Image: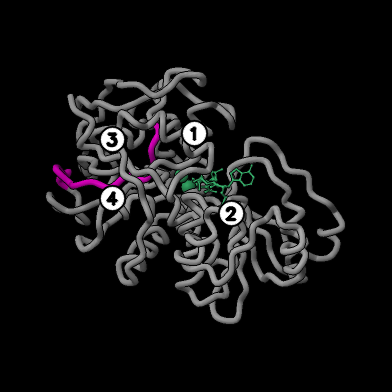
Amino acid sequence: MIDTLGFAVRQPTDTLAPFRFQRRAVGAKDVRIEILYCGVCHSDIHQARNEWKGSNYPMVPGHEIIGKVTEIGPDVTKFKVGDMAGVGCLVDSCRSCLSCDEGLEQFCDCVVYTYNSPDTHRPGEFTYGGYSQRIVVDEAYTLKVSPKMNPATAAPLLCAGITTYSPLRRFKVGPGKTVGIVGLGGLGHMAVKFARSFGAHVVLFTTSPNKVADGLRLGAHEVVVSTDKEAMRAKANSFDMILDAVSAEHDANAYLALLKRDGALVFVGLPAEPLPIKMRYMVSQRVLTGSNIGGIAETQEMLDYCAEHNIESDIEVIPMGKINEAYERMLKNNVKYRFVIDMATLKD
Ligand code: NAP
Ligand code: ZN
Ligand code: ZN
């Protein structure tokens, strides 16, 4: 067993505080990663506060992990000591169902998420995430990170990156397509970068007028402030796809109205409460669907694409001790555009 210090919440109303626990010893196919950086996803807040229900405590959040491999099991072939490695939202699955066979491990009935999941290696315990010094993961669920990437700006790719890359690829976003991105947060800013890089016409929708200039800088061709009814009306029936990355309750019908016939509104945002949908948009033959992170192979594809095209996250680096403040700022839409924890600040 490997002693580890992390930050945990102990009940939904708690703030995060230091927490000591043990990682499993390195098994034959495992890699041990000393964590350098971990991004802060809005899903960490939803789960720490039990907004989706079913949270398990104590909880060590964090699923945007990049670090250095310091130990490998005897059967590991993908990594050597000293390599940079990434861990995203999932650390295991059954490896034999249809979803696993298709590389869609996120839909496996037995998927083990990086935190807040029953830990198959330690019966009766739950997995602990990346707000911690180190992690031990089977190499099959560990990503290779090019040494030319900056580990701090690459960390958010492990969730915000793949969660936006995957649906944009699935809907074949590219030249000739008009794509809307809703919400300029961690996911939204990566979606803008990918959609632009894939060659689409990109329109950002934001509730924050002070993000317009950044939206354009990050790659949007146009930015619409969604509270401006006239500007919204002007965009009716014009989108092939809209990716909704909003973390809180909002009016999804406003975006269904902007789709072309057979255009798709794709949710990646996971507000805690259900959103009402007007059936007149459904019967006008618009598509409403969603997307959940991405499988391991596609996550590797996304990381390699980012290394090749110099795509990285815009980040604010924080020490571990500022995590509670960071959560409060995210809830006020005040992050540019992802907090990343510098794990060197988490000292024994
Ligand atoms: P984030 O950084 O906090 O960004 C969320 C953005 O949503 C905000 O910056 C804001 O953008 C907009 N927003 C917030 N409250 C709003 C409101 N009341 N009305 C309208 N817009 C609002 O969050 P994130 O980390 O990107 O995560 C976004 C959502 O995706 C979360 O619900 C998270 O759990 C979910 N998620 C899903 C997956 C998946 O696999 N499906 C993966 C990761 C995260 P503007 O200021 O531009 O309006
Ligand atoms: Zn996430
Ligand atoms: Zn499976």
Q: Disc 2 versus disc 4: distance between alpha carbons?
A: 28 Å
Q: Nearer the viewer, mark 4 or mark 3?
A: 3
Q: Amino acid at mark 4?
A: Ala
Q: Is residue 107 magenta?
A: no
Q: Residue at x 20, y 50 (%)?
A: 76
Along the horizontal axis of the image, is 218 left or right of 79? right
**Closer to the camera, 123 or 348?**
348
**Closer to the camera, 263 or 150?**
150
Q: Residue at x 48, y 57 (%)?
A: 189
Q: Residue furthest bottom?
A: 176
Q: Residue at x 28, y 47 (%)?
A: 66
Instruction: Answer with the quarter of the image where residue 143 lies.
Output: bottom left
Residue 216 image point, x, y percent: 50, 66
Q: Amino acid at mark 1?
A: Ile
**Closer to the camera, 210 or 94?**
210
Residues at circles 2 and 3 in contact by the CB criterion of under 8 Å: no
- Sequence-wise, the earlier of marks 2 and 3 is 2
Q: Which residue is mark 3?
A: 319
Q: Amino acid at mark 2?
A: Pro
Q: Disc 4 versus disc 1: distance between alpha carbons?
A: 20 Å
Q: Which residue is mark 2?
A: 209
Residue 91 image point, x, y percent: 37, 42
